[in-house]
Image (cartoon, rainbow, N blue to C red):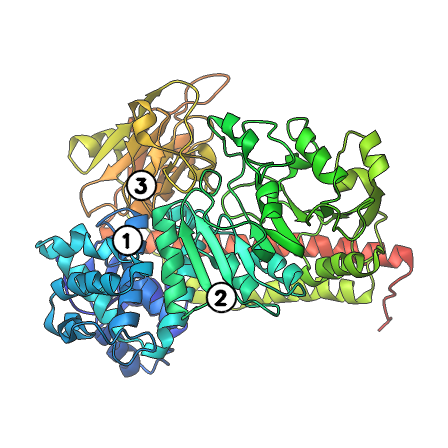
Amino acid sequence: MSTPTTRLTIAAADIADLAGVGRSTVSNWRTRRDDFPKPVAGSAANPRFDDAEIRAWLAANGKEIKRLSPDRVLWGALDALRGLGSPQEIADVASALIVWRYVSDPNSPGFEERLPERVWWPGPVVHGGLQPIQEGAAAYESLNPDFRGIFDVLIGGRWLRSGTASARAPLHQFLQELSRLQPQQLDEAFEAFHDRLTLSVKRGYDTTATSLDLTNLIATLAADIPGPVHDPVAGSARMLFAVGAQGKGRTALTGQEIDPGVWAQAIQRVLIRGETRATIALGDTIEDDKFGLANAAVVVMDPPYGMRVQNRHHLYLDERLRFGVSSASADMLWPQIAIAHLADGGRAFVLAPLGTLFTAMSGKVRQELIRQGTVEAVIGLPPGLAMTTHVPLALWILTRPGQSADPERVLLVDATQNKDLDHEAVAHVVRTWREQTSVTERLPSAAVPITELAANGWVLTPSRWIAVDKEAPGIHAVLGKLDDVAATVHKIQRASPDEIRPALRRSEGHAHLVSLGDLMKSGQLTIIRAMVRGKEIPEAARGRGLDVVNAQWIRGGSTEKKTDPKLLDGYPTITKIGDVVVLGLGTLAARVDEEGRHVVVRSDHVVLRIHDEVIDPDYLAALLVTPQNEAKSTGTAVQRFRVQDLVVPILPIAHQQAVAEQIRELRRLKSVAEELGSRVATAQEALVEAIAAGTVDVMQS
């Protein structure tokens, strides 16, 4: 089934969306219905089906066919490219092809009419040639020097140069999927497609992105400040454009990005949005700022946290850093750079680690910022808002020296306990302070005199200055909690009996158990152990490197560090899509790597690489974690497992896939059940607290 094809194909998840059913229902159709279409591409673990055959089968069986959104169509088409390169490479190619159609399609609003007619869309789709795309992309950049570099992945792309069917056929398939969209849908599809990619940061894409929650918060706070917007660390320009879309007088949107690949994403966004106000420069903001000072009324910034600055001594002469250079970390350089770009009356919004509010390392610069009246407000944010780190964050709101709402006081807002951050509530508190220098009660807040800050080490941590009196919930809050319970119960009720209770039968005899060691001897898989010397794993530069596998990730969580494998001393393992990674120390766990390109550096994180399509990766990962295998542990203080001794029952591949699908469905239901338990506990607590405080009473029936 791995033979390349130019048919339009979809995955099982797409079939479920088309039919409006659960994935386990699709699995049941495959195993129980002899007339269900057979896979035409993909692999045994990730089969793909002919789109036309699936639609015909659904129609013939009286199933309502729903319409997939444009971004879902492209997301499904992305599967055809997986395995040809890293997630970053694949996403870059897909993104560039979307933009290429935007500029080469005569029916598109972004059509570049000076392009040679032989490269116009849909020529590459109709005639099956990829050379016109390379030729046309190069011609476009020659005609538009300001956009030079946005099509590098196409002009110099190894896939477009390749003559192999395994590389060319998936590209043709993606182009055919892209041709299904209307030209007027391309900008919307581009943004929605990138949103999907950004939410899949574990796939290695757009790791510089600011979360939607933080982006919307800053856009809401800046909406009433008119004038141009600047982002000195613009990334792919999501936040810059979000702020630019709100507020008056947004005559210019400027930004700078150090990474060429991320800068290309930003320029693609400028192009496909038809954004004439935007200028995004390529370069290092600290070493070579491309923009003049005092150039914006609003400066926004989500910089890399904890970034080290090498050879910083020359920075003492930098006119932007008038408040000091106190450590090797750039955390306290960013607020100063933001202030330097502010025009009179402007405001800067800078995200930074919470530690910048209280550590001694940042104390000297923090003192000067406060003393010179640049710190208007500081907002302590709830944990978990950032995309790629669990570091608690604060939002600094800054002005030019002496221009804060009250240069003698600083507004501190404690939103750390607000799990669902209310952007309008935060904006109301900040605007009331800016316009009236008064503190509202919508959020825990305090206006702290600079004299008190000076007497207490210039510490700005809001929770240190604000005594929070917990208010008893009112009737609307209690009813809201009960509505959450009802909505979660509804999620469980919507699961069909077929999804929860599959077709089971009594098994004949005992399961045929095979050890991983025997599977390796038979050539069906390889057991790979990494060996890296040294306790410290060097971190990669911002936006670069590969995610390092840790125990938390194997158990279903996320990674916390990126590294460059070339910097490691030893033999790291780079995972591939479909690898199973086993945790052999402590509690036994296993996970399928659905993205690939993770770095394994520990010998007790063992990679199982499957070579034969008689083993389903999801089935293998699930069936490894059994009481029988957990009993094989050795050691007294810490449990250890000899991975080659672990056993799994071997079933026919179709049965393995059915089992894996059922386990996924049960895990989903378990997650919903856990959500229900949490919501019930919260609702009960709110009801009891409200009744005890006298804010709510229960009507007798």
Q: Are marks 3 and 1 in contact (CB under 8 Å)?
A: no
In this rendering, the answer to whether 549 lies above or below 15 is above
Give the residue type at disc 3.
Arg
Residue closer to the observer: 166 or 441: 441
Q: Which residue is mark 2?
A: 495
Residue 330: image location, x then y, percent: 54, 35
Give the residue type at disc 1.
Ile
Give the residue type at disc 2.
Ala
Quarter placement of the C terminus: bottom right
CA gap, disc 1 and disc 2: 35 Å
Q: Which tag, 1 or 2, sits closer to the chain's start? A: 1
Q: Which residue is mark 3?
A: 597
Q: Are marks 1 and 2 in contact (CB under 8 Å)?
A: no
Quarter of the image for residue 125 reads bottom left
Q: Is residue 685 visible?
A: yes
Q: Residue furthest left?
A: 163
Q: Which tag, 2 or 3, sits closer to the chain's start? A: 2
CA gap, disc 2 and disc 3: 35 Å
Q: Residue at x 37, y 81 (%)?
A: 64
Q: Which residue is mark 1?
A: 90
In this rendering, the answer to whether 373 lies above or below 641 is below
Residue closer to the observer: 40 or 425: 425
Structural crowding at the residue carrying mark 1, measured as other residues with C-alpha within 10 Å and reported as few (<14), some (14–19) or many (≥20): some
> Which of the two marks, 3 or 1, is nearer to us in this view?
1
